[in-house]
Image (cartoon, grey):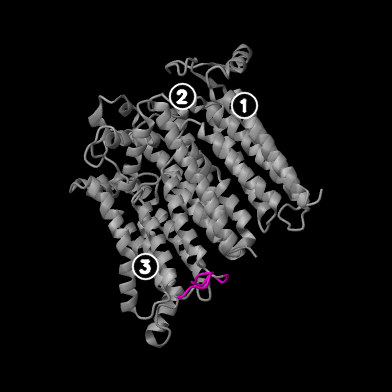
Amino acid sequence: MSQRNGLPVGLTFFVLLLIVLPYLLLALSGWPGAISVIEEAMLRLGVIGPIAGLPPHLGLSPQVIRWELLLAGLGLGIGLGLGLALFSLGKGAVNRDMPANARFWLLALLDAASLATYGLNFLLPFPLLRYYSVKLGGMGVIAVRDAGVALAVTGATVALFLLYGLAYSLCRGQDNRRLWVIVMSGGLLFAIVTVFVFPISSLDIYDYIARGRITGIHGGNPYVRPSGDYAFDPFMGYAAWQWATSPYGPLWETLVGILARLAGNRLLPNLLVFKGLALAGYVASVLLIAAILRRTAPERALAGTLLFAWNPLVILELLSNAHNDALVVALLLGAFWILSRYLDQTGDAGPRVPRPDERFWKQVCGGVALILVGAAVLVKLIPLLFLPPFLLFLLADEKGWWRRIGVGLLLLIPVLLLAIEYYRIFWQWPEVLHTVLRQATMFRMSIPSATKEALQQYVGETRAQVLVRPFLAVFALAYLIVLGRVAHALKMLPRQGFLAKVSRFLFGRGQVEGKRSWDVLVGASLSIFLLYLLLGNFWFWPWYLILPIALLALAGDERLFLPLLLAACAGEVSHVGWNFVWYWWGVSWDTLYRMDALVVFFMVVPALVVYAINLRRVPASPS
């Protein structure tokens, strides 16, 4: 079949999936009446059975798919994945000379295998519409810590990452309309299916709902009053952090208050509203990545879009668990998109359409981009790290440091006004400050955390916390070095004399000179966040990798693809550890520290080893 006739084939495949999908969702999600025939048949066959201790939902008896069916789904995912891997290696999937038809159908099969794995291994056993009112639940609670389910979810997760890696190899260096159809429709279908999966590995969505009701329903201040103070509200019993005030920014708390008022006093609509927000953030992020790459690096636009859109960690954490990182990533990508709209083909600053004053329009658009970064900071504080590299990028064309300082302050005024406006709503000192200070005393699943846990056995917890503070100093130094490299690459530092020699020695290594200003900005943003996760972050959860995955899609650094894939896969598998293995060991502080150390090791060490190997063997960007 010719490439010209392939688009109708892809569209037909997409349309057929959309026609079949609603029936599959109704059958698998536990909707009243729609599942009755299938449910009765499964009961007769003994495929499903009741679980003790869970209340009925939606008029149906609570059930879990037994591990035999899950292992069937696992076999489908791994079998197809390994079969396609062998076939792909035999036919040269990574070879750009591979026939277009073969590449298209291989990608379509990977799409179908991934969709089947999400459906059989996640939607079918953990439907949102059946288990949504289980308090403090998760995959371990629903599966009653069943070893078969733990094995099946682990295998399915690994299979999804295998299928994802193969799909990425097929799309590298390609720009085919048929492949675009598969990539975009596949991501959308994965997302829609996963929206209806119970939040199996995080209860954050219930805390969002609880704090939204504090603000939107009860008129309280989530920075002063925890959800536990509103025990009379039945929704608060679902929150995991009932003792804690909000750790998020005022823009997020304002938004969740509005959503709480819109969703009303029923739990399911509240869950669906937040799931819908996560879906909107995911779709917006995928479209923004595609639009940015089509303009800045069209040769890797397809692969870069798939890198984010098909990543299993992104799918499961954003759509199943509905983390507010979906909004943070969408806002930051919106800022990058605005800057990309006013870049010429070489990536140098300047509008595409001639204007009376190109520098003026660049700064206007830069101001809007900074407002979006500021909005992301008002959801979660950590995007504050991106403001300095953005400012350096926008001020590179200004002559003289006094002028740069003046223009920088003008650009920051709207961001400061936005922060003042939103913090004014909740301002109560020093309670608002606790949002920041509490993070410095929380340790979980990070390199500093594992170090602290090892030290406290000998020096006590208080002294161990003091001894790991130097990690912050090391991160601060690394952060300043990255900013110096940005300033050097953008020709903002002296070019002659002693200071020029010093700047070249400190910041001119690593082939930063001669890079496009756009590549400098994106690469620095990715480096900063990865350094933060490794050194400056004491409290880590796997969904923190969503943002670096999005930045890697823009940067296209091939040396980081496999390390991030390994870290993301280990992060998703760690949920099985916390939901099953930890309980088998016996829930205690000792076993918590053991599990923490195990997770940190498997997330960090293999990724760093592969990255060290790639530094010598893999180019920074695709050829």
**Residue 8 location in percent, x, y?**
74, 45
Task: Please name the residue that numbered disc 3 is placed on.
Answer: 480
Residue 417 found in image quarter:
bottom left
Residue 229 found in image quarter:
top left
**Residue 85 location in percent, x, y?**
70, 45
Q: Is residue 141 above or below residue 155?
A: above
Is disc 3 in contact with disc 1, using a CB cutoff of under 8 Å? no
* Mark sitting earlier along the chain (2/1): 1
Residue 137 seen anywhere in this rendered image of the structure: no
| Amino acid under disc 3 | Leu
Q: Residue visible at 69% across and 38% down?
A: 80
Q: For this view, does 402 lie left or right of residue 15?
A: left
Q: Is residue 544 above or below residue 231?
A: below
Magenta highlight range: 345-356
| Amino acid under disc 1 | Tyr
* Mark sitting earlier along the chain (3/2): 2
Queried whether the magenta region covers residue 349, the answer comes back as yes
Q: For this view, does 29 lie left or right of residue 239?
A: right
Is disc 3 in contact with disc 2, using a CB cutoff of under 8 Å? no
The residue lying toward the viewer, choosing from 214 and 116, is 214
The residue lying toward the viewer, choosing from 528 and 405, is 405
Separation of disc 3 and disc 1 at Cα? 54 Å
Secondary structure of the residue carrying tag 1 is helix
| Amino acid under disc 2 | Tyr
Separation of disc 2 and disc 1 at Cα? 20 Å
Secondary structure of the residue carrying tag 2 is helix
Queried whether the magenta region covers residue 511, the answer comes back as no
Q: Which mark is residue 23?
A: 1
The residue lying toward the viewer, choosing from 116 and 222, is 222
In this figure, what is the number of numbered marks?
3
The C terminus is located in which quarter? bottom right
Task: Please name the residue that numbered disc 2 is placed on.
Answer: 131
